[in-house]
Image: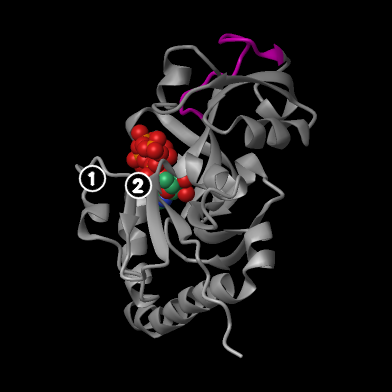
Amino acid sequence: MTAPIPDTKLVLALPKGRILKAASPLLAGAGILPAADCLDEGSRRLRFPTNDPMLDVVRVRSFDVATFVAFGGAQLGICGADVLMEFDYPEIYAPLDLRIGACRVSVARPREQGTGEQGTGKQGTGDNPARWSRVRVATKYPAITRRHFAARGINADIVHLHGAMELAPVLDLSQLIVDLVDTGSTLRANGLEETETIAHVTSRLIVNRTALKTQPERIGALIARFRQALGAQAPREAATA
Ligand SMILES: Nc1ncnc2c1ncn2[C@@H]1O[C@H](COP(=O)(O)OP(=O)(O)OP(=O)(O)O)[C@@H](O)[C@H]1O
Ligand SMILES: O=P(O)(O)OC[C@H]1O[C@H](OP(=O)(O)OP(=O)(O)O)[C@H](O)[C@@H]1O
């Protein structure tokens, strides 16, 4: 008996921007070729066909990939571990580290911070942030930030920004920031220094758990193609390391 042909397309959510560029060789390695304008930042299209008539790609903000997958609008996605940590969706399973988009979520503060009592909203004593009881932190990761400071007995008052966090301490919105750091050049250019690494980040292949349960062959086959593409990349990476 032949298996029934599935009649619904699968949807793979991709983040626009740097991760999309980094992921495109992997997609090609996995045999997934989205329509050419998927990589064109100027295109206004959001949903793209691929060479597989049963697989479409949607291009969304990196922060929204996890939400599209968690709600089942997309069955698969590519997403930074930072975003997964922030939302902590139980509906998401992240089977593969794609080894792209490497950076870290870190705490940073002004380089020359007197760390006395001036500044916004800080309570507690001394110039050691670890001994503060309350601190104001600018970030686009409120959940990660609250969890991080709560684990140290510090109450974090969050200033929720979506970019340019580095300005917040300089303009006295906060004492600290929690943001992504890679080379550190953005921090340096804005007079900040990294004080603590909260987590190391790479991008992951993510899948909706219910979709995986209901369509294990189709989704399992796609996961296997990504795994194979990663395996095929490894010798090249080793050779250039
Ligand atoms: N400097 C960096 N180096 C390496 N990876 C990074 C860096 N900044 C961000 N990332 C990774 O890439 C993902 C997307 O970041 P990117 O800066 O492209 O988008 P964004 O600015 O967070 O989102 P948007 O532009 O949609 O608001 C992040 O979630 C993180 O996993
Ligand atoms: O340590 P670095 O190598 O300087 O990288 C860190 C910067 O990269 C990210 O910003 P991005 O370039 O994505 O700009 P955006 O946050 O404004 O999108 C992040 O938010 C930092 O600002």
Numbered badge on residue 16:
2
Q: Quadrant of the N terminus?
A: bottom right
Q: Amino acid at mark 1?
A: Glu
Q: Residue at x 66, y 19 (%)?
A: 135
Q: Residue at x 49, y 56 (%)?
A: 77
Dominant SS type (magenta) = loop
Q: Is residue 121 magenta?
A: yes
The residue wearing badge 1 is 41
Res 147 seen here: yes
In the rendered image, residue 222, in percent from the top left (x then y), is placed at 50, 73
Q: Is residue 220 left or right of residue 133?
A: left
Residues drawn in magenta = 109-123
The reply to whether the residue tagged 2 has its Cβ within 8 angstroms of ligand 1 is yes
Task: Locate residue 96, reporting x and y percent.
Answer: 56, 68
In the figure, 165 relative to 7: above or below? Answer: above
Front residue of this view, candidates 28 and 164: 28
* SS category of the residue bearing label 2: loop
Magenta segment includes 195 = no
Q: In the visual, does 202 lie left or right of 95? A: left
Which residue is outermost to the front?
A: 1
Using a 10 Å C-alpha cutoff, classify the residue at mark 1 as few (fewer than 14 neighbours), some (14 to 19) or many (20 or more): few
